[in-house]
Amino acid sequence: DAGVIQSPRHEVTEMGQEVTLRCKPISGHNSLFWYRQTMMRGLELLIYFNNNVPIDDSGMPEDRFSAKMPNASFSTLKIQPSEPRDSAVYFCASSSRWGNNEQFFGPGTRLTVL
Amino acid sequence: AQSVSQHNHHVILSEAASLELGCNYSYGGTVNLFWYVQYPGQHLQLLLKYFSGDPLVKGIKGFEAEFIKSKFSFNLRKPSVQWSDTAEYFCAVITGGGADGLTFGKGTHLIIQP
């Protein structure tokens, strides 16, 4: 298995631009998680899905952030408009209820907003 | 809401020294506990996990952790560290049924000097 796949690996954009981060979970996993890592706040859960349905989005910073999971093999995290304080590494993770819910992380997307 | 505290933000050790990283969580119910490692420039990898049973769990690369319920602790240990153990270490918890997102500690930056 290729593991959790994220794209792009690096993104540099200007303030005000729309940013879309992509994630492909491990095949067969039914839960998908988006995390953000910053120096100041560490690793934070943004949102997670079970069976493609958003369960808890209380970690999403504000309305500029949105996430979708149109099918079991794809999810997006969108920031519109982006701001410099959104600069962080965004990780996607997936898990299966049959595997004791261990979460497998992708390589992350390093976002820089200028 | 649950929280996780890691007592040491930065630890510097010499090779062959023994390691213990502290982790405490705040939640009175059932928890699943994890230690993740993030090597420089890489994504999060699972070191070990506790779900139930023997409170002393062994992970990869010679790491182990002990779950002490009365102390709400899950400290990570290694008898003899190597230079290659230089990394960021994160303690994390999932509460209840385990299908939720991880709550992470702020991390401990471990530097092993040759």
Image (cartoon, rainbow, N blue to C red):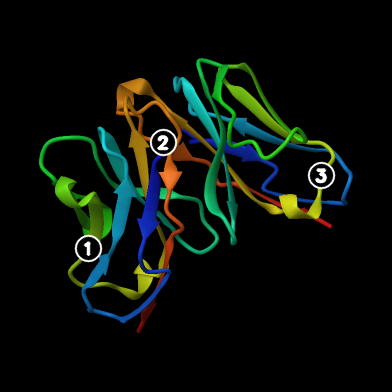
Residue A79 image offset from top left, x and y in percent: 77, 37
Residue B6 image offset from top left, x and y in percent: 37, 60
Q: Are marks 2 and 1 on the same chain?
A: no
Residue A110 image offset from top left, x and y in percent: 67, 52
Q: CA distance from mark 3 to mark 2?
A: 28 Å
Q: Amino acid at mark 1?
A: Arg
Question: Which residue is identified by label 3?
Answer: A82
Q: Amino acid at mark 3?
A: Ser
The chain ID associated with circle 1 is: B
Give residue B61's quadrant in the image: bottom left
Question: Which residue is identified by label 2?
Answer: A103
The chain ID associated with circle 3 is: A
Residue at disc 1, secondary structure: strand
Left or right of A81 on screen, residue A26:
left
Which residue is found at the position 21% from the left and 74% from the top? B18
Left or right of A66 on screen, residue B25:
left
The N terminus of chain A sits in image quarter: top left
Mark 2 and 1 residues: CB-CB less than 8 Å, in contact? no
The chain ID associated with circle 2 is: A
Give residue B17's quadrant in the image: bottom left
In this rendering, is residue B57 above or below B80?
above
Q: Tell which tag, 3 or 2, sits nearer the viewer.
A: 3
Q: CA distance from mark 2 to mark 1?
A: 22 Å
